[in-house]
Image: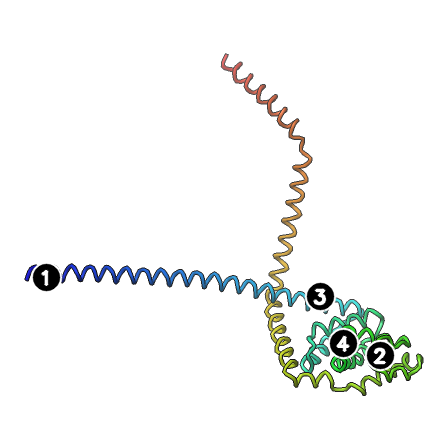
Amino acid sequence: MPNFLINVTTKGAKTASSSIKRLSGSLMSLSKVAMVGATGGAIALGVAMKKATSAAAEQELQEKKLTQALGKNADALIKQAGALQQSSRFGDEAIIQQQAYLASIGMSEQQIREMIPVTMDLAAATGMSLESAVKNTAKTLSGMTGELGESVGSLRDLSAEELKAGEGINMMRKLFKGAAEGEVKTMAGAMDQAQNAIGDAAEALGDLALPLAKAGSAMTKEFAEKAEAAFDALGDIDFGKTFENMKTNMGALTGMIIDSFK
């Protein structure tokens, strides 16, 4: 009986010890997983915030360019870009960029408002980029068909005077009306719109973080400038003379100490 109790006790202790070790190992594994997860989450959050602030900064830059090129408040055109994004594959940032280009070549706000939807339909119908569609359409107001003479043959039937009067733009409005909106109904269009929506969400998040990012950038710039000034100051030091002065002064100080003891 004693041997039986001893065996049971011994086996029980070993089993308990083994269980505790397994439990300890599991807890350690869980803690490692948690640490890795937390680190990965922090990195992912940092990357997301960087992308968000970059998106917000780019949007802010394009809006600033538009305002400067227009020479006045550009809220109406910015709102137009946002509305056109909802009914096309083009993001508002890309639209604002082209609005700014048209403003930079002297077009009025009204001309820009009328031309942008036409160029979006043209781009959708012909497969050219929005930038190319905008630049080539703008050329028609100078009496030239440019590359559009190849893709929109009927423009060649218009005289230079008619093109300058905007007849080319009116013709393309009738020819391609609804092409940009029609693309939204395709799978590719739906995916682009989803991407634009994600971009807008990132910009909204970036707008919240942008003031902090600007402050951080200013601090980094100030630190870099002070560090540069400090290194420049170090470069002006004559270390040879400095060490000679130190040796001379140390010698004089040592002499004074010895004389005082004497």
What residue does disc 2 label? 150
Disc number for residue 61: 3
Relative to residue 169, is residue 204 drawn left or right? left
Q: Callout 3 environment at 10 Å: few (<14), some (14 to 19), or many (20+)?
A: some
How many numbered dots are placed on residues in this image? Answer: 4
Q: Nearer the viewer, residue 122 or 214?
A: 122
Mark 3 vs 2, N-terminal side: 3
Rendered location of residue 252, percent (x, y): 58, 19
Image quadrant where residue 121 sits:
bottom right
- The quarter of the picture where the N terminus appears is bottom left
Identity of the residue drawn at 70% across and 72% down: 93
Q: Nearer the viewer, mark 3 or mark 2?
A: 2
Q: Compare residues 152 and 38 and report the one nearer the observer.
A: 152
Mark 2: secondary structure: helix
Residue 87 x/y as whole percent:
68, 83
Marks 4 and 3 sit apart, C-alpha to C-alpha, by 25 Å
Tell me what residue is drawn at x 63 percent, y 49 percent. Answer: 223
Observer-side mark, 3 or 1, equals 1
Residue 38 image offset from top left, x and y in percent: 46, 63
Badge number at residue 5: 1
Q: CA distance from mark 3 to mark 1?
A: 82 Å
Q: Earlier in the sequence, mark 3 or mark 1?
A: 1
Q: Residue 162 appears in which quarter of the rendering?
A: bottom right
Q: What's under tag 4, amino acid-wise?
A: Met
Label placed on residue 128: 4
Q: CA distance from mark 1 to mark 2?
A: 101 Å
